[in-house]
Image: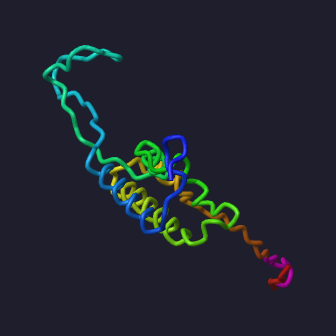
Amino acid sequence: MRHGGKQKYIESPEIMWEHFLLYKIEVKANPINIIEQKKGNIVIPKGFTGDLPDNLVKIPAQRPLTMDGFANWLSDNDIIVDVSDYFENKDSRYSNYIHICSRIKKNIRQDQIEGGMVGIYNPSITQRLNALVDKSETVVTKKKVFKIGYKTGEETNE
């Protein structure tokens, strides 16, 4: 069913999973090109808009999977305008999608964490996006104080 040029719903959890797999294939097949300058004497000024000089190269960088990216992909491909109701199980109307939504979130999280761990993606941003924190605890213990008596040489425990 169409609504304003966009579908109103995703027919089944299996179809949602198929959409996610298509999103994943498209993202991984289209890396972001990072433009780097080869070593040399020519310096390219910031904001340069002309033709790329010979000493610049394009380095493909893998794109990460993201929930926002998946939501935008669904909308851009005229599948659904807003998929958030499915992931939030709004009014318990999407209970049969809970498993597949959880699986999609875990796939995205896995991609981000593994990519951050091996340096494909920025580890700091990966940590923040996935609520990963490096916690350290400070433990303070009460010290035992021993007094040594001057006259008897005996210890007393306080």
Residue 86 on the magenta span: no
| Placement of 62 over or under 93, stated as above or below | above
Question: What is the x, y in percent for residue 118?
Answer: 33, 57
Q: Residue at x 39, y 54 (%)?
A: 116
Q: Residue at x 17, y 28 (%)?
A: 39
Quadrant assignment, res 89: bottom right
* 114 left or right of 55 in image: right
* 103 left or right of 63 in image: right
Read off the magenta span.
146-152
Q: Residue at x 26, y 17 (%)?
A: 44
Q: Residue at x 21, y 33 (%)?
A: 58
Question: What is the x, y in percent for residue 84?
Answer: 58, 54
Question: What is the x, y in percent for residue 85?
Answer: 61, 56
Residue 147 on the magenta span: yes
Q: Nearer the viewer, residue 136 or 93?
A: 93
Work out which residue is located at the far front of the displayed protein and give it. 1
| Placement of 123 over or under 140, stated as above or below | above
Q: Nearer the viewer, residue 41 or 13?
A: 13
Q: Nearer the viewer, residue 154 or 43?
A: 43
Question: What is the x, y in percent for residue 35?
Answer: 26, 31
Specify the quadrant that holds the C terminus.
bottom right
